[in-house]
Image (cartoon, helix red, strand yellow):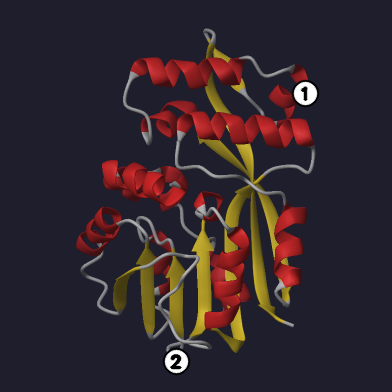
């Protein structure tokens, strides 16, 4: 059921994810150069590629990028948009059941997508399986604090905005999963990501009534939640807020 909602949501407005400032920003140059250290001999897998921003960024550095996504319409739109990049291969694929042999990839990436995966443990297991013994996995996603009220608030507001959202996990939860499957973190950083409310709502919601419902929920946050998520308002309308984004470079033990 969750995966059908993902397909429905991303098939509706694939162009929005190409132009979204949140997604289009891509990976910071120092992450590519210092963490991944890509080379022209490397084959790369980009899981849940969406608008293909990571695939496009890595394309000049590596031999081939396999850009996968669950949603056919999203993948087709991305392929059309990135047709000038000749070393990209587009494959319809489920992040929890990857159609690749063991030990296939030097680099694996997944950015701002894992909160849509119903079974994150299967996703991590698949990453480990398809990554070469000396490979690297760059994981990036929005995360929540390990505080129940803060976690519940952000997951609720995100589910109201996007019915395909499953759950933002905490860094502690992600670390536990990585450790469970014999993967270790070599580098990590947390960023405060500022989201403009109007753009954030427009990506997934169609009616003004739906958008108002989510905006009102943001405004009802208590003082601690408002401070933590940096919710700013103007004329009784939320203008922006922040969410934590965690990125980690992961390898086999």
Q: Residue at x 51, y 63 (%)?
A: 110
Q: Residue at x 54, y 34 (%)?
A: 158
Q: Residue at x 72, y 25 (%)?
A: 225
Residue 131, compared with residue 93, is above or below; it is: below
Residue 123, compared with residue 165, is above or below; it is: below
**SS at mark 2 in the image:** loop
The answer to which image quadrant residue 54 occupies is: bottom left
How many angstroms separate mark 2 from mark 1 (CA)?
A: 49 Å
Q: Does the CB distance between marks 2 and 1 fall below 8 Å? A: no
Q: Where's residue 172, x and y in %?
A: 77, 55
Q: Is residue 249 left or right of residue 165?
A: right
From the viewer's side, name the closer residue of 163 and 17: 163
Q: Where's residue 3, x and y in %?
A: 42, 51
Could you say which disc has been placed on residue 188 in the image?
Answer: none
Residue 93, compared with residue 50, is above or below; it is: below
Where does label 2 land, which residue?
Answer: 41
The answer to which image quadrant residue 37 occupies is: bottom right
From the viewer's side, name the closer residue of 215 and 194: 215
From the viewer's side, name the closer residue of 12 and 58: 12
Callout in the foreground (2, 1): 1
Where does label 1 land, which residue?
Answer: 224
The quadrant of the rendering that contains the C terminus is bottom right
Dot 2 crowding, Cα within 10 Å, few <14, some 14–19, many 20+? few
**SS at mark 1 in the image:** helix
Q: Residue at x 48, y 27 (%)?
A: 197
């Amino acid at each position: 059921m969750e995966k059908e909602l993902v397909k429905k949501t991303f098939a509706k407005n694939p162009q929005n994810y190409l132009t979204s400032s949140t997604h289009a920003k891509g990976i910071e140059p120092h992450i590519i150069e210092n963490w991944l250290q890509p080379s022209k001999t490397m084959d790369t897998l980009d899981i849940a590629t969406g608008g293909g921003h990571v695939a496009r960024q890595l394309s000049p550095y590596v031999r081939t990028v396999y850009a996968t996504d669950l949603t056919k319409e999203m993948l087709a739109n991305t392929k059309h948009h990135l047709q000038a990049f000749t070393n990209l291969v587009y494959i319809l694929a489920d992040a929890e059941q990857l159609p690749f042999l063991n030990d296939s990839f030097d680099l694996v990436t997944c950015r701002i997508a894992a909160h849509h995966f119903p079974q994150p443990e299967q996703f991590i297991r698949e990453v480990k399986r398809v990554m070469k013994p000396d490979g690297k996995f760059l994981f990036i996603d929005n995360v929540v604090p390990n505080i129940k009220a803060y976690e519940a608030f952000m997951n609720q507001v995100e589910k109201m905005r996007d019915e395909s959202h499953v759950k933002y996990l905490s860094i502690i939860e992600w670390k536990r999963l990585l450790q469970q499957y014999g993967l270790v973190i070599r580098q990590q950083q947390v960023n405060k990501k500022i989201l403009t409310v109007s753009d954030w709502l427009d990506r997934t919601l169609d009616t003004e009534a739906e958008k108002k419902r989510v905006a009102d929920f943001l405004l009802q946050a208590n003082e601690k939640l408002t401070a933590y998520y940096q919710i700013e308002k103007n004329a009784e309308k939320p203008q922006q807020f922040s969410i934590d984004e965690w990125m980690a470079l992961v390898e086999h033990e």
